Amino acid sequence: MKILLISYGDYEYDGRLRELMDVFSGIGELYAFTRGKTPAYEHHRIMDGGYQKFIRDVVKEGKALGGADLLVLDNRKSVIPGLILKKKLSVPKVVLDCRELYVPKEVHHLEGKLGCIIEKRGIRRADIIICANEYRAEAMKKIYGLSEKPLVYENLRMLTYSSEERMRKEKERFSKYDVPGEYRIISTSGCSFSRMNDVLVRNLDRVRFPCRLFLVGSGSAEERENMRALIAERGLDNVEIIDQLDQDALKSLIGISHIGIVNYHQKDQNNRFCASGKVFEFLYEGLPVVTTTNPPLKQLCDEAGVGAADDSFCDGINAVIEDYEGYKKRVREFAAAHTVASNNERLSRELREKLF
């Protein structure tokens, strides 16, 4: 089976994309068009430039393949070039991964509303739909009037080092933060106030143990300026603002951390029913988590005991530190029972049942 996968995601930074490529490369001969820096294998094409150029280049190079048995569309920005190629190559089957849950009435800008219209068309044309958790599957079935729920493919992902050299380099880079007696807390949502990192910083002095907070991620200059002002207002000297990190660097920083923060607002269904890959990155590195009280996150914390759900953050952090070894034990048990490989195998099995 010849499979064509299209994604506007960046291979180096997009864990779900990497796992999807692994799944479909096990089903057939995979040709992938994504953004990024370095191709992962022979038939992986890296597309550069903006979105319009992406569409043109994918259509051009996709036509050159001469045909495909299956078209895999990752997220809604793949829908336009995907449906063009479906028609030109007469591809018989289409799989669409709806990794987000954007609802038109909850989107308030024109570009987002157009994206919803495009995604809806992709959903109507897809033979198989994938989403990221059971909450979203139920919501999508109702919103789009689907005859059956989408396949659920959880965002299980594990960080890996690209080389021994990078591992040594990044461990050395962050070794200055490895201070004995200090609990290190990491959030990978940067300086985002919408992700409630302002609440996290405001309540940091209510943590009853010596700690240091890493705010890691991309963001606007305004967000960083506002966060620095808040840190100064609170008189904190234990908060580090760090740019977005690639896999190697992020794995090293998480490796010297103790607690991972997973935070989303609940103002729309996409965030309320969040399907966080961050939580699994932390758990697979052995870190308990403190999360916001979004239903999927709270359910994970309550049922697996791998963290605490707390919108103030400080009470959750205190609770985790007070029983740190107990939380660590449950994290190890959860990670052993819920592997990336078993998650991928489950999706592969369900796809094969529907495709063959």
Image (cartoon, helix red, strand yellow):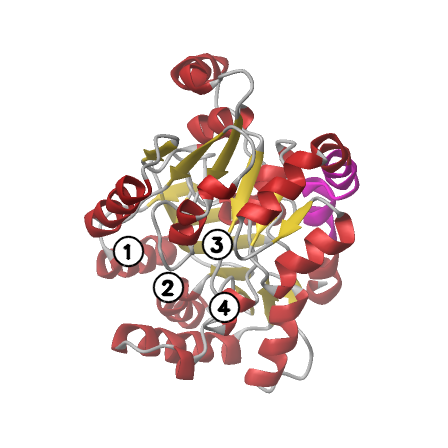
Sequence-first tag of 1 and 2: 1
Instruction: Give the number of the disc on residue 5.
Output: 3
- Residue at position x 72%, y 35% from top? 323
Three-letter amino acid code at the position of disc 3: Leu
The answer to whether residue 16 is left or right of residue 219 is: right
The vertical placement of 67 against 215, above or below, is: below
Residue 317, given in percent of the width and then of the height, sits at 58, 42
**Res. 121 image quadrant:** bottom left
Closer to the N terminus: mark 3 or mark 4?
3
Callout 1: SS: helix
From the top left corner, tell me how far across and down residue 35 is, in percent. Answer: 35, 46
Return the residue at label 1: 54
Classed neighbour count for the residue bearing mark 2: other residues with Cα under 10 Å, few (<14), some (14–19), many (≥20)? some
- From the viewer's side, name the closer residue of 122 and 269: 269
Tags 1 and 2 touching, CB below 8 Å: yes
Secondary structure at numbered mark 4: loop
From the image, tell me which residue sits under label 4: 266
Q: Secondary structure at mark 2?
A: helix
Q: Nearer the viewer, mark 3 or mark 4?
A: 4
